[in-house]
Image: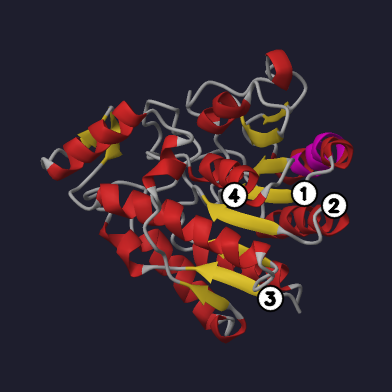
Amino acid sequence: MKKTGYLHDNRYILHDTGPYHPETADRLLALYEGIKEEGLLERLTMIPASRADLKWIEAIHDPAYIRRFEELCFSGHNIFDDPDNCISTDSYESAFLAVGGILDTIDLMMTDKIDNAFCAIRPPGHHAERDKAMGFCYFNNVAIAARYLQEKWGIKKVAIIDIDVHHGNGTQHIFEQDSSVFYYSIHEHPSFAFPGTGRDFEVGTLGGHGFTKNSLVLPGQGDDAYYMLIQGDLLPAINTFEPEVILVSTGFDAHVDDEMSDIKVSTQCFSWMMRTIMDLGERHCNGRVISILEGGYSLERLPELAGNHIKILLNS
């Protein structure tokens, strides 16, 4: 059995998006209950969050953008850049704790205290640009994690595998000129016209040409498309890139019961995807895989999906 970390901190719940917003604190409560009901908590290394050092966030985001986020939160505003991006007075601190918890998790993995981890954080991150909030995202958690691995731990090649049903436009744009980070996304397109990026001809630019790969799934295609594209696109790309660490932008919103998409992926397909990613991790990274929560909005399905996800990380 693997030593699996579980990043969980009640302060993430303080990020208040208001009534009727899909990215709600109830998502984390549903995940936790699912893992608890499966009797998995005692098998995990529980990781509390600490606040990130500003320098790691500035490694990805424009300092003026960070200051603007802080000022809007602490001045009582409830919108940041777009009506989708609801904030509260605690959102700035929650975002710092989300990043800090992930960096703490990386430190534990890189010092062999854990083998892999699931980071149940909010706010999510993969839509956040260098200087713009989008799609419920404020700091690009997975991008900051990749740069931290490189700058603190000397990792030369990081792969980011994004299985959220929406394209991670922020992550792609941040690394599209960078050959040291391979970004792969499988997502619905068109997907409620959001974010409108992630076409198959987007493969990176300049020195990063060839280090971005997008797999597009049409509405309703479901499991068969995921099986075909993961095997045909992801596997050869990762086997060629040979990463030292794999980061997973884990969204559960492609599920058939999630109203934020129309892809209709089954619970079984989600498990197959994660087992496939873990196999890649064993082959290339000595199992060093960190899964970071992005989307997933079906409160009825999240407990089951989270329990399965953790079981796969534990290699049970």
Q: CA distance from mark 4 to mark 2?
A: 20 Å
230 magenta-colored: yes
292 or 97: which is nearer to us?
A: 97
Up the image or down, 16 lies above or below 31; here it is: above
Looking at the image, tell me whether mark 2 or mark 1 is earlier in sequence order: 1
Q: CA distance from mark 2 to mark 1?
A: 6 Å
Residue 142 showing in the rendered view? yes
| Residue for badge 4 | 152
Looking at the image, tell me whether mark 4 or mark 3 is earlier in sequence order: 3
Q: Amino acid at mark 1?
A: Glu
Q: Magenta part of the protein: which range? A: 226-234
Q: CA distance from mark 3 to mark 1?
A: 18 Å
Q: Amino acid at mark 3?
A: Lys
Q: Are marks 1 and 4 in contact (CB under 8 Å)?
A: no
Up the image or down, 298 lies above or below 131; here it is: below
Looking at the image, tell me whether mark 1 or mark 4 is earlier in sequence order: 4
Q: Residue at 44% across / 27% down in the picture?
A: 130
| Residue for badge 1 | 244
| Residue for badge 3 | 3
Looking at the image, tell me whether mark 3 or mark 2 is earlier in sequence order: 3
Quadrant for the N terminus, please: bottom right
Which quadrant would residue 209 be assigned to in this image? top right
Q: Are marks 4 and 2 in contact (CB under 8 Å)?
A: no
Q: Amino acid at mark 2?
A: His
Q: Nearer the viewer, mark 4 or mark 2?
A: 4
Residue 267 position within the rendered picture, expressed as x and y whole percent measured from the top left: 66, 59
Q: Are marks 2 and 1 in contact (CB under 8 Å)?
A: yes
Residue 30 position within the rendered picture, expressed as x and y whole percent measured from the top left: 43, 67
